[in-house]
Image (spheres, helix red, strand yellow):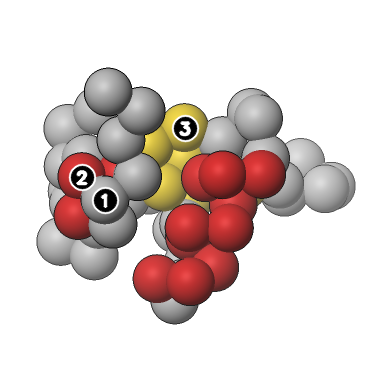
Amino acid sequence: MEYGIGVRRTPERVHTGDCRMGSRGRPATAQSVREILLTVPDVVACPLCRPDCELVLLDT
């Protein structure tokens, strides 16, 4: 889970554990990632590592 900078540090982007694009990340469980991707509208799945594919959360 990659978090923004600033006081609130809210989640911004989700990556798989082996993605090199995440810079401000912290580990997260699969369940917490699912919940965040489905409920927080500003959070996006990394287009490079595609954690939404791994968690079977695709809209198509």
Q: How many marks?
A: 3
The residue labelled by disc 3 is: 44
In the image, what residue type sits under mark 3? Val
Please give the label number shown on residue 53.
2
- N-terminal label among 2 and 3: 3
Q: Is residue 26 above or below residue 1?
A: below
Please give the label number shown on residue 56.
1
Secondary element type, mark 3: strand
Q: Is residue 51 above or below residue 42?
A: below
Are dots 1 and 2 in contact, CB under 8 Å?
yes
Residue at 76 percent across and 41 percent down: it is 6
Secondary element type, mark 1: loop
Please give the label number shown on residue 47.
none
Label 3 Cα neighbours within 10 Å, binned few <14 / some 14-19 / many ≥20: some
Q: Position of residue 19 (x, y in %)?
A: 18, 51
Label 2 Cα neighbours within 10 Å, binned few <14 / some 14-19 / many ≥20: few
Measure how far apart labels 1 and 2 are at the Cα level.
5 Å
Residue at 48 percent across and 71 percent down: it is 31
> In this orientation, does residue 3 appear?
no
Measure how far apart labels 1 and 3 are at the Cα level.
15 Å
- N-terminal label among 1 and 3: 3
Q: Position of residue 1 (x, y in %)?
A: 46, 57
In the image, what residue type sits under mark 2? Cys
Measure how far apart labels 2 and 3 are at the Cα level.
13 Å
- In the rendered structure, the answer to whether residue 50 lies left or right of residue 25 reads left
Q: Position of residue 18 (x, y in %)?
A: 15, 61
Q: Quadrant of residue 41?
A: top right
- In the rendered structure, the answer to whether residue 54 lies left or right of residue 3 reads left
